[in-house]
Image: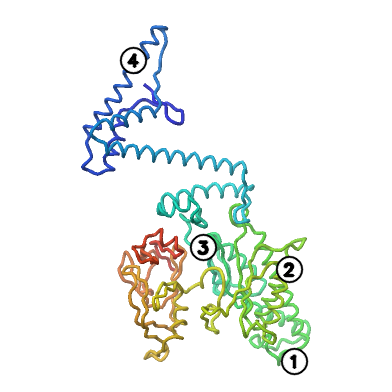
């Protein structure tokens, strides 16, 4: 006797599979329901019934044609229906219901597979092209592979990672989970890049290392490389929080080089110390006016060309599947130094000029002008002319966006650009925490927490005369083990002995050398004593607004950063 499977193939009848399915339904209900004897009896009864039918049909067929070789075939559905009827007719009604649920679940899985298969076929044939995020070419080779894989990753996320309640709400269009195809694999979304450190120290890629930049043209090229490298290890966008401050040192380097060239070829004088060469040096400007004008003009030209190169690179170097370019954003407009102003002006001029032969409006980078009173808001302020240029670019090229740095909830240290209000992600090196003050919840960095409370409480000096602390009241901080616990003191160390701890999942923590970490393999270990491949303990418990018992799906659904247990790596 042959069984006709749902895909049309044939296989020999196997009574053991019936018995196994019944035992599985029993075990799902609990150990008390397991009855091997009942499972064996029903499987034999079903087998006997169909063997009897086979014998009868064979006998009838042979009456008409004695030489006919008959292969009796039974659809798998008929077998399952008969098992179900047998169970319902027995005293095992609960097992029958569980068996029915099992069949329904298997049907859902088959239907889902067919739906995914059908959807992938449409992608292969380029039917119903959406060009997701307006940045994926679904007609391209990479686009088809990217979108096809995305369907599978979405299904895995909804079925295996996200709670059934949230998945149901998504499927019913009551909520929308953005970047769902990255949910199961992605660890980061929309982050700022520490350009200052990477350009100063150089960086390592998979196939090589990059030396530090020594000119503005090289620095701008490396910004495009850094953005693309980072976009390969996360989903969503990458950004710079203050590209004018980050790139200003490399304008200085270029100016020094051009000034030295001018001294040699214009003045025939090599007696100026390189340390004295600076755009702000009026003595040098008055003593060597031709050389100064030459160096300034060449630096300005180099900066303008570098900015145009950055725009063209970020719009043409397709580094993601589907011919995508990286989602990039840059914040600027608050550096009042000559070098920083030159960066901002060059970027805005490149935006206005457009890209390519026809000077089209660029898609990326998304530029954000940081609007701040006292800096660029009103006439007479040092960067007001840059605001006017930004408005011209906005009217012609859509960008830049404007971010209000005078927002009432924005807390800044005017001497620290890392605290300036910027869009896209969070400031690199500032660990995000969750706490409550006067029963109002805040999710922000330690750094912003310090500036907030330094305005509300008295700041004290520690006995060493350098470090500071604030005694707090009515503040509770979220602990992954114990929930919200009282926070009595906030300490700020000004130690120069800092360590940059890098984890294998891409996250970083900037901490002092005596910061303790709970490891899985060695217990409590100070940061300075951590070793490569130490396993840092991370919790799956996350704060939830109603303070019910949190779970992973709730945390991610609310937008909190989720830390998985990963091996820590130092570099």
Horizontally, residue 260 falls left or right of residue 125, namely right
Q: Position of residue 353 (x, y in %)?
A: 75, 68
Instruction: Rate crowding at label 2 as few (under 14), some (14 to 19) or many (20 or more) other CA atoms within 10 Å.
Output: some
Of the image marks 2 and 1, the number of the one nearer the N terminus = 1
Q: Which mark is residue 55?
A: 4
Q: CA distance from mark 4 to mark 3?
A: 65 Å
- In-front residue for pair 310/58: 58
Q: Which residue is mark 3?
A: 189
Q: CA distance from mark 2 to mark 1?
A: 42 Å
Q: CA distance from mark 1 to mark 3?
A: 52 Å
Determine whether the residue tagged by mark 2 lies in a helix, strand or loop: helix
The reply to whether discs 1 and 4 touch (Cβ–Cβ < 8 Å) is: no
Looking at the rendered image, the quarter that the N terminus falls into is: top left
Question: Which-is-in-front pick, marks 2 and 3?
Answer: 2
**Does 244 appear above or below 280?**
above
Q: Which of the 4 image quadrants contains residue 211?
A: bottom right
Of the image marks 4 and 3, the number of the one nearer the N terminus = 4
**Does 292 appear above or below 55?**
below
The reply to whether discs 2 and 1 touch (Cβ–Cβ < 8 Å) is: no
Question: Which-is-in-front pick, marks 1 and 3?
Answer: 3
Q: Which residue is mark 2?
A: 396
Question: Which-is-in-front pick, marks 4 and 3?
Answer: 4
Instruction: Rate crowding at label 4 as few (under 14), some (14 to 19) or many (20 or more) other CA atoms within 10 Å.
Output: few
Determine whether the residue tagged by mark 3 lies in a helix, strand or loop: strand
Determine whether the residue tagged by mark 1 lies in a helix, strand or loop: helix
Determine whether the residue tagged by mark 4 lies in a helix, strand or loop: helix
- In-front residue for pair 310/291: 310
Q: Position of residue 82 (x, y in %)?
A: 33, 28
Of the image marks 2 and 3, the number of the one nearer the N terminus = 3
Q: Which residue is mark 1?
A: 287
Q: CA distance from mark 1 to mark 4?
A: 114 Å
């Amino acid at each position: 006797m042959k069984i006709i499977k749902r895909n049309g193939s044939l296989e020999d009848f196997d009574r053991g599979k019936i018995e196994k399915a019944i035992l599985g339904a029993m075990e799902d209900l609990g150990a008390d329901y397991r009855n091997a004897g009942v499972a064996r009896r029903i499987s034999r009864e079903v087998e006997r019934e169909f063997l009897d039918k086979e014998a009868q049909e064979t006998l009838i067929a042979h009456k008409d044609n004695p030489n006919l070789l008959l292969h009796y075939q039974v659809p798998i559905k008929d077998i399952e229906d008969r098992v179900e009827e047998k169970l319902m007719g027995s005293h095992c009604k609960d097992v029958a219901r569980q068996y029915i649920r099992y069949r329904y679940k298997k049907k859902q899985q088959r239907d889902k597979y067919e739906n995914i298969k059908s959807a992938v076929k449409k992608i292969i044939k380029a039917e119903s092209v959406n060009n997701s995020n307006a940045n994926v070419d679904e007609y391209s080779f990479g686009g088809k592979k990217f979108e096809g894989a995305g369907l599978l990753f979405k299904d895995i996320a909804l079925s295996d990672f996200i709670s059934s309640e949230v998945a149901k709400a998504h499927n019913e269009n009551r909520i929308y989970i953005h970047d769902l195809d990255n949910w199961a694999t992605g660890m980061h979304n929309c982050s700022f890049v520490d350009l200052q450190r990477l350009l100063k120290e150089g960086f390592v890629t998979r196939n090589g290392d990059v030396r530090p930049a020594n000119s503005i043209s090289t620095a701008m090229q490396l910004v495009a490389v850094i953005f693309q490298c980072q976009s390969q290890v996360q989903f969503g966008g990458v950004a710079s929080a203050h590209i004018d401050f980050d790139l200003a040192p490399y304008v200085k380097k270029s100016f020094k080089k051009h000034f030295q060239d001018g001294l040699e070829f214009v003045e025939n004088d090599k007696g100026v110390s390189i340390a004295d060469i600076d755009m702000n040096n009026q003595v040098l400007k008055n003593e060597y006016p031709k050389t100064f004008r030459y160096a300034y003009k060449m630096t300005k030209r180099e900066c303008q060309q570098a900015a145009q190169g950055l725009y063209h690179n970020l719009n043409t170097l397709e580094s993601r599947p589907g011919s995508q370019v990286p989602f990039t954003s840059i914040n600027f407009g608050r550096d009042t130094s000559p070098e920083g102003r030159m960066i901002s002006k060059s970027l805005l001029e490149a935006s206005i000029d457009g890209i390519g032969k026809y000077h089209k409006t660029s898609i990326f980078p998304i530029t954000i002008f940081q609007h701040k009173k006292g800096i660029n808001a009103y006439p007479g302020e040092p960067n007001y002319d840059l605001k006017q240029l930004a408005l011209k670019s906005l009217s012609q090229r859509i960008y830049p966006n404007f971010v209000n740095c005078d927002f009432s909830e924005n807390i800044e240290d005017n001497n620290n650009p890392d605290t300036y209000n910027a869009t896209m992600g969070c400031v690199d090196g500032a660990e995000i925490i969750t706490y409550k003050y006067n029963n109002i919840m805040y999710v922000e960095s330690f750094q912003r927490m310090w500036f907030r409370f330094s305005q509300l409480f008295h700041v004290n000096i520690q006995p060493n005369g350098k470090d500071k602390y604030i005694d707090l009241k009515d503040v509770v901080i979220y602990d992954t083990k114990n929930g919200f616990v009282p926070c009595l003191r906030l300490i700020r160390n000004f130690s120069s002995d800092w360590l940059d701890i890098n984890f294998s999942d891409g996250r970083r923590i900037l901490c002092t050398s005596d910061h303790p970490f709970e490891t899985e393999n060695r217990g409590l270990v100070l940061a300075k004593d951590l070793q490569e491949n130490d396993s840092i303990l991370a919790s799956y418990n996350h704060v939830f607004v109603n303070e019910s018992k949190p779970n992973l799906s709730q945390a991610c659904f609310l937008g909190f950063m989720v830390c998985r247990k990963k091996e820590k790596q130092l570099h």
